[in-house]
Image: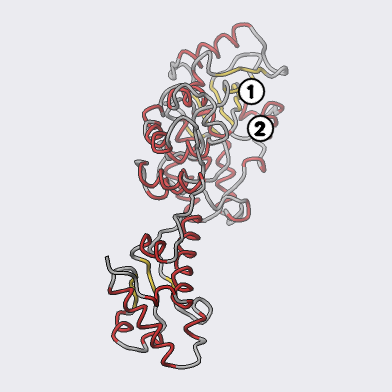
Amino acid sequence: MTPPPLWLDTQGVRELLNLLLDRLESAEQRGSAKSQSVALTERSWPTLHNAPFESHKEELWAHVMALCRWGWLQVKPADALRSACGYALAPRVTVLNEEALRHAVNRPQRLQSKEERWRHAVQAGLEAPAAVKRAVAEFCIDLPDHAMAQVVQQLNKLPSLADQPMLLREVSAQLFWGMSKVLDKRQALVAALLGVDECPFPESPIQLQVYLPVGGYTAVLFIENVTSFEQACQSAGTALAGLALVYASGFKGSAKRLRLPGGCSLYYAGIGALGGDVQRTFETWLFGRDDSASPVYFWGDLDFSGMRILAAMRCTFTQLRAWEPGYAPMLQTLLAGEGHSPDAADKSGQRPLDTCGCRYADQQLIPAMKEQGRFVDQEAFRVK
């Protein structure tokens, strides 16, 4: 075996090789690609740029050219390798053979952190688009008795459970060898994998706050925000007369467990009907899944997130529609150029949608939001 040339152990060459390895390790820690190039500037390789004579610079550059011929490095532009003073062309260097560089400077492979190992496992094994991989990579799962690659393979099974009426810990136990707490505080991971805005699996039975009119009701209205729900319960307005009012936080109203007796807990408002036929009628409708028994509506913020809640709830309540008495004044405000920009209310991350399945929302509400580029919050309106 031919011994390595002596110049490979000189200060200038070792400085360059260690610089390149430093950049590789820094990129690994950030989760970036290894193929990024390094500009050979006065700051990055001072030995070259501070050499007192041109002959010294040309000698160092000749060593770089040799490393390229060996297949250790790549230099761009390629013209820089055709000149003894190619360093003057502001070249960029990319490592092609990391193992050879480490051997040359006696620098063993750096031990990766668990976060880096998780990112690599996700990139290699998760069956999902790149954007989803990036999101999942932020939630490191390190289980002592299982390789991270095995954990990722279990995550690939999560979409098959998406329609199951399960609690989050039940899902975790199903996926991760009976361990029920793996997905605790990782709801964002679940949402990213399923392509939804919020995790559909509740941590505990969904809590529904319900107001039932004493004289009975003719329709059910789901209200997105608790402030508007409370105002509606206290209202004597004719638009709300004969409506059963229901509040379930955010996307929880779309969960299929909502229509199972063990999947939700009902809390009835004391100013409404308690017990008796009205309560029995409501629970028969909710758990009987007979959507023809009562018309059902949704009223929430006039923003894309509110429309996504409406769309998601239509999977649970098939006849659900946007409540026009609530949305009409909000729409009028929006078309008048009022409301707020997404950035002003920390809603810039909301994804637009084209349809939600409700004719009124699809033909009027969603197009108006897209045209105006603004949203309207529900709490600013009292229905009379």
Which quadrant of the rendered structure holds the C terminus? top right
Q: Could you say which quadrant of the image residue 279 lies in?
A: top right
The residue positioned 28% from the left and 74% from the top of the image is 69
Q: Could you say which disc has been placed on residue 7 in the image?
A: none
- Residues 297 and 153: in front is 153
On screen, residue 27 versus residue 236, left or right, reads left
Which quadrant of the rendered structure holds the N terminus? bottom left
Real-space Cα distance between discs 1 and 2? 9 Å
The residue positioned 48% from the left and 59% from the top of the image is 25
- Residues 355 and 180: in front is 180
Tell whether label 2 touches label 1 (CB within 8 Å).
Answer: yes
Query: Percent x, y for residue 54?
Result: 43, 93
Identify the residue position indicated by label 1 in the image: 209
Q: Secondary structure at mark 2?
A: helix
Going from N to C along the chain, the mark reached first, 1 or 2, is 1
Q: Could you say which disc has been placed on residue 226 in the image?
A: 2
> Vertically, is 52 above or below 358?
below
Residue 311, visible in the rendered structure: yes
- Residues 360 and 55: in front is 55
> Vertically, is 171 above or below 98?
above
Query: Percent x, y for residue 270?
Result: 72, 17
On screen, residue 25 versus residue 215, left or right, reads left
Q: Give amino acid for label 2.
A: Val
Q: Could you say which quadrant of the image residue 214 lies in?
A: top right
- Residues 66 and 26: in front is 66
